[in-house]
Image: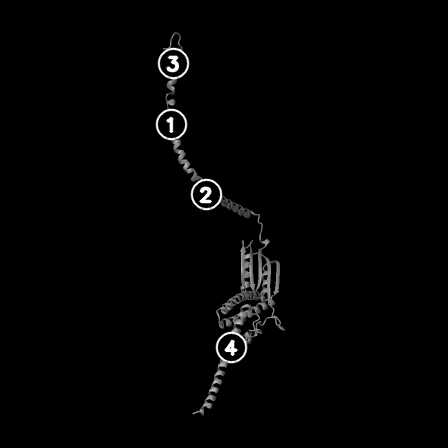
Amino acid sequence: MTAPVPQFRAIHATWSRTILGVLGLALGLVALTGCSSDGLQDRGTSGAVAPGYGESPDQDVSAPDEAVGGGGAGGDLPENAPTGGTTLSEQIVRTGDLSVEVDDVTAAANRITAVVDAAGGNIGLDQRYGEAEDGSADLVVRVPPERFDDLLETISDLGEELSRSVSAQDVSTAVADVDARVESLRNSVDRLLALAAQAVSVSDLIAIEAELSNRQAELESLQAQQRELSDQVSLATLSVALTASSDADTDDTGFLASLGDGWNALLDTGRGLLSLVGLLLPWLALLAVLALPLWFVVRPRRSAARPAGALERLPDQQGGAPDSAREAVSEPAASAPGRQPE
């Protein structure tokens, strides 16, 4: 009965070593997982502070698709970005100002509009003042750069050219810089999104989302600059000023011209009188409102005073003659000699 004991002890020792090995392997895996989590937190914290142009190499290795497709540290720059041995494609912004004196401003402006539409451009501004023969117009037109010179000559042929100013600005470096920054920020936003998906704590997630919001705002601003530069390069801008020719104003001195001047003067006088009436009408209405109560108060008093004065004058007018006659008769009687007055 004691023989199997050594064999049992051997089996027990074997199982003990196996269990200890498994436990050691499990502890190693747990430690490795903890280190990986700490590394992820460190990378998330650094991603929330660093600007996004210089993430660690581990992050670039974890995204092979971005590295192959042009992202990552080696693929941030677009094709037209300045790199060693790479020539920038020309990005030219063309602008100009042209002033022309024409006989008919309206006809010239309509002609320019038609030419611009045919060239595939657009009208950015169209302001016209006065009549066709003595007015003016300001236009801002935009056409493809290859049609810019032809448009200048076409507008200049509409009348007498007074002034011309043309400029060309090379913005190749600015375009390449904005494109590179946009591409880099896009990659940075993508990496922050990946880190946010792998965040293991609320604090890490909040920090990543805050930095992600800042990166997205900066990306939108750069994209707006990118669109503006692209628009300026794709379409040249020309400001046109049209004025009526001084020869179009003829000074007529004949009968018809004088008749027309007289008629215009009459119309101006009529308009002036109407304006005067319109100006005085509110004041007259105000005076009428103020005078009407006074008229109602004064009129009864005058009506009451008029009969009393008439009654006072009536006895004098009716009895004035008899009294005078009696006085005339009594005076001789009193003056007779030897007669005493009674």
**Is 285 displayed left or right of 172 in the figure?**
left
| Callout 4 secondary element | helix
Instruction: Look at the numbered discs 2 and 3 and tell me whether their residues touch, using CB distance below 8 Å.
Output: no
- State the image quarter where residue 240 is shown: bottom right
Question: Callout 4: few (<14), some (14-19), or many (20+) C-alpha neighbours within 10 Å?
Answer: few
Q: Mark 3: which amino acid? A: Ser
Residue receiving disc 3: 330
Front label number (3 vs 4)? 4
First along the sequence among labels 2 and 1: 2
Distance between the alpha carbons at the discs numbered 2 and 4: 97 Å
Distance between the alpha carbons at the discs numbered 2 and 1: 41 Å
Q: Residue at x 38, y 27 (%)?
A: 308
| Picture quarter with the C terminus | top left
Q: Mark 4: which amino acid? A: Ala
Residue 311 appears at what percent x and percent y? Answer: 37, 26
Closest to the observer: 26 or 186? 26
Front label number (4 vs 1)? 4
Closest to the observer: 126 or 155? 126
Q: Label for residue 282? A: 2
Q: Mark 1: which amino acid? A: Ala
Seen as rendered, the residue at the extreme top is 338
Question: Callout 1: few (<14), some (14-19), or many (20+) C-alpha neighbours within 10 Å?
Answer: few
The answer to whether one can see residue 315 in this image is yes
First along the sequence among labels 3 and 4: 4
First along the sequence among labels 4 and 1: 4
Seen as rendered, the residue at the extreme right is 85
Q: Residue at x 56, y 60 (%)?
A: 140
Q: Mark 2: which amino acid? A: Pro
